[in-house]
Image (cartoon, helix red, strand yellow):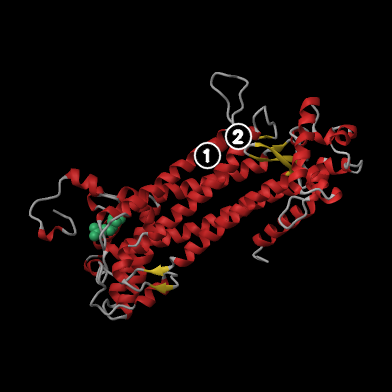
């Protein structure tokens, strides 16, 4: 019968309950946040005259000792203590005696866990931003070498128009930039202190919530305690942010898997980031992007899991909420390792420019250019130009020749109004470079985009 809450109970908790009820096996990850929160709370109680300075000194020393015990792995995490909050408080009282019993004045585990978890999540949002920036930097390094490398731009996974490889990579830079903005805005929006909300309704003690908020680096103090202790939007947001980022990563991963196949042969992942087969000696498998694609699914599961935990929960705190942490921890770890390994895989992969360019020689990638030529040079309405071009493509199919390599005489046969200068328009590089509209693939435009992202990474968003 040594539970902190045992006063109103007459029989001890069953060990089955201990196992089922406890979160200490995983919430111990929040020990730094928990102890910081306790130190701030104790400092505030002391300033308010609720603790005396001797008690504050003992609490500070005791908590610091606990940090070193945890960090040197001698702290005893006991499942019967239920969660890290009670485990740490119990140990504190064991070390310093009565002063330890005063620490929980004007506080509840409900605001305590909200502080700990919120601060952890805010920190992780910002750490992921840094990891995303490192990934983007490597993507830019590769992209800068390939602003002239042609690659088939696709829609429906069919050859569409020639683009350059850097332009393709820059599409991912755009996605990662939006990801960064989401992580940053979550960190900012949720940087609000729950401490002092106590169980749900505030406290009659004369607490200074602004003081603890500022010690803990929060921008402000929450407005309504009932909401604060039951709010897990911050956890849902990081899950959504990671899920969306992983969705982007999964799309790039899918492309890396395809591009590594014999059929594409656009890239070769380095041996250090590829795996072999236990039976087929020739195999070199792209496990890294495949796993990135797969892990995306697990992250979605965590997002959906927590949304479902929170659905329909009455105010304020309910134990259901304890189920908020493992999915977030798992998603955060997944995000961290995924960003790191994707960065390394990209940095070390071989880009097979020659194969990318040869792939452009089939599929009539410059067909739109022929239609555009007919509009611009022959004053033919686009719809008719589209039809004429369709016939030219059909001729190409019959001759087994790509439009970009077709003999002029066939084009002339299809439509009298076509002149020899059309041949320039049908060239693939010309086609790519013709797309000079803002945000387009022309090498010059692509270079501007890369410059934009370089400035962005240097903190200059203009
Ligand atoms: N371990 C709990 C959690 O993670 C801490 C809050 C417990 N509060 C309570 N009233 N039982 O949610």
Q: Are marks 2 and 1 in contact (CB under 8 Å)?
A: yes
* In the image, residue 147 above or below residue 455: above
Q: Which residue is mark 2?
A: 257
Which quadrant of the structure image shows residue 267?
top right
- Classify 10 Å Cα crowding around label 2: few (below 14), some (14-19), many (20 and above): many
Is residue 168 or residue 125 the one in the foreground? 168
Q: Residue furthest right?
A: 420
Is residue 410 or residue 205 the one in the foreground? 410
Q: Residue at x 58, y 29 (%)?
A: 275
Q: Residue at x 57, y 53 (%)?
A: 131
Q: In x, y percent, where is residue 320?
A: 27, 53
Is residue 77 or residue 173 the one in the foreground? 173
* In the image, residue 408 above or below residue 336: above
In the rendered structure, the answer to whether residue 82 lies left or right of residue 283 reads: left
Q: Which residue is mark 1?
A: 293
Which quadrant of the structure image shows residue 101?
bottom left
Q: Residue at x 78, y 46 (%)?
A: 432
Residue 76 can be seen in this image: no
Q: Quadrant of the C terminus?
A: bottom right
Q: CA distance from mark 2 to mark 1?
A: 10 Å
């Amino acid at each position: 019968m040594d539970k902190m809450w045992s006063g109103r109970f007459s029989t001890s908790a069953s060990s089955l309950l201990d196992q089922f009820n406890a979160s200490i096996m995983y919430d111990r990850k929040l020990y730094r946040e928990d102890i910081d929160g306790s130190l701030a709370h104790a400092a505030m109680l002391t300033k308010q005259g609720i603790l005396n300075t001797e008690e504050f000194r003992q609490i500070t020393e005791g908590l610091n000792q606990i940090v070193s015990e945890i960090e040197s792995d001698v702290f005893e995490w006991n499942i019967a203590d239920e969660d890290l909050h009670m485990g740490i408080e119990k140990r504190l009282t064991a070390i310093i005696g009565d002063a330890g019993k005063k620490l929980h004045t004007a506080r509840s585990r409900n605001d305590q866990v909200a502080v700990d978890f919120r601060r952890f999540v805010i920190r992780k949002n910002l750490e992921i931003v840094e990891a995303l920036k490192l990934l983007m930097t490597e993507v830019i390094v590769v992209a800068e070498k390939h602003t002239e490398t042609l690659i088939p731009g696709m829609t429906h996974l069919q050859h569409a128009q020639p683009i350059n490889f850097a332009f393709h990579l820059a599409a991912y830079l755009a996605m990662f930039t939006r990801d960064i903005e989401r992580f940053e805005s979550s960190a900012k929006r949720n940087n609000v202190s729950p401490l002092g909300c106590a169980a749900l309704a505030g406290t009659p003690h004369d607490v200074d919530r602004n003081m603890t908020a500022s010690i803990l680096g929060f921008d402000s103090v929450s407005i309504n305690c009932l909401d604060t202790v039951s709010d897990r939007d911050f956890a849902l947001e990081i899950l959504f942010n990671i899920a969306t980022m992983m969705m982007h990563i999964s799309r790039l991963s899918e492309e890396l898997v395809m591009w590594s196949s014999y059929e594409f042969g656009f890239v070769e992942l380095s041996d250090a980031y590829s795996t072999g087969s236990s039976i087929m000696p020739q195999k070199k498998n792209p496990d890294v992007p495949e796993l990135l694609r797969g892990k995306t699914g697990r992250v979605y599961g965590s997002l959906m899991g927590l949304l479902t935990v929170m659905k329909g929960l009455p105010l304020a705190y309910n134990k259901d909420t304890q189920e908020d942490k493992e999915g977030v921890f798992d998603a955060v770890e997944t995000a961290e390792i995924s960003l790191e390994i994707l960065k390394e895989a990209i940095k070390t992969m071989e880009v097979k420019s020659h194969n990318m360019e040869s792939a452009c020689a089939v599929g009539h990638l410059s067909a739109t250019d022929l239609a555009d030529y007919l509009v611009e040079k022959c004053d033919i309405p686009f719809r008719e130009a589209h039809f004429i071009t369709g016939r030219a493509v059909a001729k190409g199919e019959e001759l087994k020749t790509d439009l970009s390599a077709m003999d002029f005489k066939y084009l002339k046969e299809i439509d009298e109004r076509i002149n020899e200068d059309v041949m320039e328009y049908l060239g693939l590089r010309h086609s790519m470079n013709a797309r000079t509209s803002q945000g387009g693939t022309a090498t010059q435009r692509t270079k501007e985009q890369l410059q934009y992202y370089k400035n962005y990474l240097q903190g200059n968003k203009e």
